[in-house]
Amino acid sequence: MPDQTEKPGKDQAAGDRPRRRQARGERRIAQLLEAAASVFCTTGYTAASTNAIAREAGVSPGTLYQFFPNKEAIAIELGDRLVHEMRETYGEALAPVAPETPLEEAVGTAVDRFIDFNCRHPVFLTLMHGPDIPGRITEEHDALHATLLSRVESLLSSFMPDAPAADITRTAHVCLGVYKAGLDLVVAHEGAERDAYIQELKDVLVRYLRPLVGDRTAGDTAASFENTP
């Protein structure tokens, strides 16, 4: 009996080839970005070179130039992807909480999510805070910080409904400043010592916020959280 299996026609096969090439291209880009992240973390952005990135990726410089014209383009693409993931992270970290959630748990959950992101992507700090980074990355970081600050202010307003706007803004700045200072200590350690620094960071934030929030818990303002943009 002849084979009745339908075979793809020429048009379908031709249509599949661009998709396969595109998939291979995306994998290659991901490979190059991963290599760039490693090189940037090791040498810093300024000292990094496209040759070093190609070598780390296990490809020729010519292959790298098929996808990126220079080091700055690689850094910008990597920065864009990290900023996108970071926005998703703080969206989850500062999401509404259950009515019974105490302040300690709300702070702890947020800190854990941010710490997890930064430990998984150490290059984020290199690109966002290092010297001589491309201007577009600086602009992306400034926009990210402004949005994050706005969300923190919204959440603090729910905990501190009678506080003046200037006090809310100041408190939000302090919280972010404390977190960033603690983050440097956290990423500089590993294992049990890192865990200890993470707990210290949480304790500092809770002890700072407790007198400002008073006896209110996150649960007292859960309804307000639901309207947070």
Image (cartoon, rainbow, N blue to C red):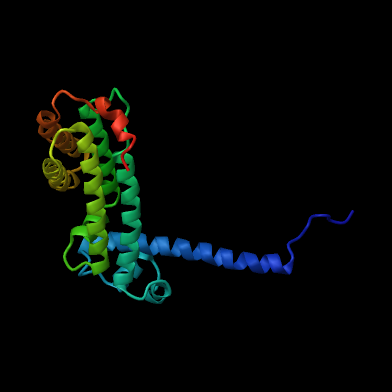
Q: Seen in the image, is 8 located left or right of residue 31? A: right
Residue 15 placement: quadrant: bottom right
Observer-nearest of 50 and 198: 198
Can you say whether 99 is above or below 70 in the image?
above
Note whether residue 223 is visible. yes
- Picture coordinates of residue 37, whole percent (x, y): 30, 60
Residue at image position (29%, 52%) is 121
Which image quarter holds the C terminus? top left
Note whether residue 134 is visible. no
Residue 76 placement: quadrant: bottom left
- Picture coordinates of residue 218, whole percent (x, y): 24, 28
Residue at image position (32%, 50%) is 87
- Picture coordinates of residue 74, whole percent (x, y): 33, 67
Can you say whether 63 is above or below 173 in the image?
below
- Picture coordinates of residue 141, whole percent (x, y): 24, 58
Can you say whether 128 is above or below 116 in the image?
below
Observer-nearest of 13 and 85: 85
Q: Seen in the image, is 1 located left or right of residue 56? A: right
Can you say whether 128 is above or below 136 in the image?
above
